[in-house]
Amino acid sequence: MDIKAYIESGIIESYVMRLTSPEETADVVSMMSAYPEIAKAVNDFEISLEQHLTANAVVPSPDVKQAIWNELNPDFLPVIKEDPAITGTAVRRPATWKYLAAASLVLLLISAVLNIYYYNKYADARREYNGLLAERSSLFANLDAAQTKLNVLDSSMQMMKDTAMQIIAMTGKNSKATVYWNSRTKDVYVLQNEMAKVPQGKQYQLWAIVDGKPVDAGMVGDCGDVLCKMKNIPRAEAFAITLENAGGSAVPTMSQLYVIGKV
């Protein structure tokens, strides 16, 4: 069980914020029981979330309180007590239900303010969480791409160390490329050192010059700064690259010859 990967997967944050499915919730609870590190991660995130909400708490404006009392003022005027023996009028007593209604209204307004506040905080936290997840996914994708490229470069370095590998430098006007030709396996690779970006609908094509005649050695793909695997060539006197229509040509377009190099 890779505990670190499980903790960094985002499931801890989702569990604390009640965003997990019942199955995921049960799984987290089970993992907390089995692994103290996961239980600690849950507790740490709960504490950090509470600290974040507390640190960013907003006290309701005094205007809210004043507005409430202004609304309730007529029901809370001072009670004037009169002696019924003198005036003949009954003593006016405060209505208990009005106090209860006022208290309920105050609590309702406070609850509404807090609900709005915590909902906004939740929305901010959710957006931040989603942003972090997206950033994490992007970092992992970039890491995978970098690792793949590193593996290709390492493989290319190992091939170039082979004593059977011949290196043919091809040059031309403002262009350079290199052919790596294994005299034992007859494998051919090409590296575009300094080649202009091909126009739309065009593609570079590698040619092997055999007995003075050009032999198709394959289309050069967009391999960037790594080796492109080409067709096997049993023997050759030279190699060249021309610019052809996408898909290649049966014969090279000599007016579009970019580089050439002798074996």
Image (cartoon, helix red, strand yellow):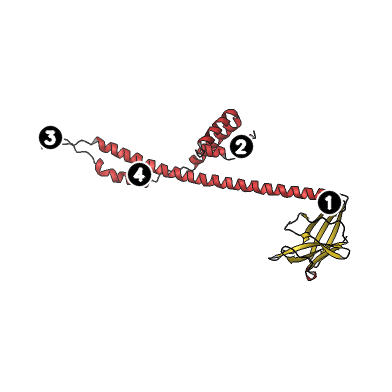
Q: CA distance from mark 3 to mark 4?
A: 37 Å
Q: Is residue 190 visible?
A: yes
Q: Residue at x 53, y 32 (%)?
A: 26
Question: SS at mark 4?
Answer: helix
Report, in whole angstroms, how far the alpha carbon at label 2 lies from the one at label 3. 79 Å
Mark 2 vs mark 3: give the one in front. Answer: 2
Precedes in sequence: disc 4 or disc 2? 2
Determine if residue 47 is in view: no
**Position of 56 relative to 255 (above/below):** above
Q: Earlier in the sequence, mark 1 or mark 2?
A: 2
CA distance for labels 1 and 2: 41 Å
Left or right of 124, for residue 191 = right
How many discs appear? 4
Q: Which residue is mark 1?
A: 160
Work out whether 227 lies above or below 109.
below
Residue 2 placement, left or right of 88? right
Q: Amino acid at mark 2?
A: Tyr
Residues 144 and 85: in front is 144
Q: Which residue is mark 4?
A: 65
Q: Which residue is mark 3?
A: 84
Q: Nearer the viewer, mark 1 or mark 4?
A: 1
Tell me the residue that label 2 is attached to: 6
The amino acid beneath tag 3 is Pro
Q: Quadrant of the C terminus?
A: bottom right
